[in-house]
Amino acid sequence: MKTFHKLYRVSRIWILLLIVLTLPYWIPNNYYLQVANLGMIFSILTLSLNILAGYTGLFSVGFIAFYGIGAYTSAIVVTRLGWSVWVGFILAGVVSSLFSFLLGLPTMRLRGMYFAVATLAFGEIMYQVFLNWTSITGGTKGIKGVPSPEFFGISLRPYSKYFYLILAVLVIVILLTRNLINSRTGRAMLAIRENDIAAEAMGVDVPKFKMIAFLIATFFAGVAGALYGHEVRYVSPESFVNAESAAVLAMMVVGGIGSIPGSILGGFILTMLPEYLRFLGNIRLVIYGAAIVAIIIFAPKGLGGLIEWIDGFLSGTLKLGTHKKSTEKVEGENGHS
Amino acid sequence: MVILETKGIGIHFGGLKAVSNVDFSVEEGSISAIIGPNGAGKTTLFNLIAGFYTPTEGTVYFKGKDITKMKTFERTYMGLARTFQNINLFRELSVMDNVLLGLHTKTKCDPISSMLNLPNKLREERESRKKVMETLEFLNLAHYVNEKAGSLAYGLQKNLEIARAIVSHPSVLLLDEPASGLNTNDLDTLSQGIVAIRNSGITVVLIEHKMDVVMSISDKIAVLNFGQKIADGNPGEICCNPEVIDAYLGKDE
């Protein structure tokens, strides 16, 4: 058993890498490949929402607006101004952050539900802007012919190639998020989520660090939006309705609040699931909903918690009985107070 | 030299005068205590000093500067640290992360270098973690470094809050009822700990009900009752002051 654990610990990263890198070959159907790409884009989006809601405790209900701003920004500068797609990706993040800065100025002092409602309103406003500012956004017709990027002369238009671009961005966002959490800034964000009074006593300028979290999260969301626009090569308002924001929230909760692997799985699986259930006809949405409820009930720490448990089991680091011990301590503590 | 001072400080919540016209001063390098019956306004006075409440009257001076209008986090940056009566830890975070947060004012790495793991961030993290371990060892918490703060026993949580407050080596430490809920054995350790903290160069102000702790370690004691200061002086003066005895034991009619 010990040798198995050791073997697993050494090989897990390589197995994961092998599976992920060869994924386009496992999915022969072009349609499902496109869905897988979309799933990874939603992984990025869910991870960015997690920076805001999971780590900083700021529940944003209109988060899809920033994804939309990113998609439109890149589509507009590339199709209207003829700029490089790569510039479009960066600008998508920058413009999205710019909007969050403007929204953040009056709302960073709001707490809990008030911030959530403010972002809900912002999501609705942005949808109306996408829909009605026809001269810029093309209104209901949207923007057609958004080009695919080229990488040193190689067109990334085939989904099997675009896959690797999304994968690269996803890996970068994962690494940046992980580094952020293990830093002074990341800890200030976690402190605000846990206890903003104590955070302030530690010297944390609470509105400032909420704003930093907001800017970083919306930058990544904007880039994810641009990735989406250049994947489907068409941007229109119905991709950015508030129901999509709810879907991203569900992805975050199902994946596991404050969990990086959870965000990736939540975004990916909840995008894939409705497509793979398509053979069930109209009942698929009921099953989709039931699956979400089941995960929340049976895995309260989400898919991320589940994966960590399996990983701990396979690598032999899982301490059985730790759960029981911690509940005992909680009871002892109640006895004191 | 006086390091912390309030002049005529007061706050009214509606018609209730929680604290009114209190002059209170703390000598640098001393241990001062604020005592008084429940509801006398001791914690409110702490909140006024730390900036959690804005006073309706009076001024607060810290290191010779008027800080009355300063925000809480700015006062922390100036070197004013505190613990809370009802423990305000980051319960879901590890002991290490809790104390690292105590170093927030002493670190300055920006978000971009943090995300990119630039050398300045890695160096700062390494130094911070080393400093945290030293503080945890000083307070006998090193063993629990990776535990979740919320899963620690009550007494350890109180210690952790002190560790988080002193890791940055503040100029003044405000301790709100550090002895509450501790047993007699722990009380001696606590008293020694507070003296050791003072000896390391941190001025200590504490609110405390346990009289043996207050009397044995304090250089100066201020007594509050119904939001007003009724006496101050060294332990010898306070324990025999008739007004103080009245406030605590009731007047002999």
Image (cartoon, coloured by chain):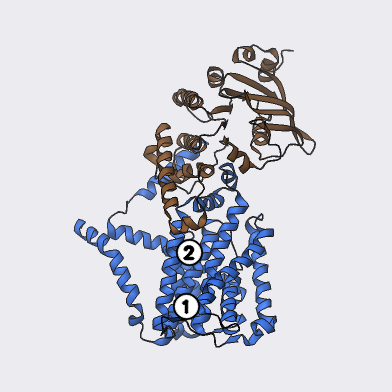
Chain colours: A blue, B brown
Q: Give the label on residue A91, or none.
A: none
Q: Quadrant of residue A201?
A: top right
Which quadrant would the N terminus of chain B be assigned to in this image? Answer: top right
Q: In the visual, does A38 lie left or right of B4?
A: left
Q: Nearer the viewer, residue B242 or B99?
A: B99
Q: In the visual, does B220 lie left or right of A3?
A: right
- Residue on which the image places disc 1: A38
Q: Please tell me whether residue A244 is drawn above or below residue A207 in the rendered image.
A: below
Q: Mark 1 or mark 2: name the one nearer the start of the chain.
A: 1
Which quadrant would the C terminus of chain B be assigned to in this image? Answer: top right
- Residue on which the image places disc 2: A296
Dot 1: what SS?
helix
Q: Residue at x 66, y 15 (%)?
A: B245
Q: Amino acid at mark 2?
A: Ile
Asked whether the residues under the numbered discs 1 and 2 touch, taking CB atoms below 8 Å apart as contact, a structural biologist would say: no
Mark 1 is surrounded, within 10 Å at the Cα level, by few (under 14), some (14 to 19) or many (20 or more) other residues, namely many
Disc nearest the viewer among 1 and 2: 1
Q: Amino acid at mark 1?
A: Leu
Q: Please tell me whether residue A147 is drawn above or below residue B247 in the rendered image.
A: below
Asked if residue A196 shows in the view, the reply is: yes
Give residue B25's position: percent from left, percent from top: 66, 24
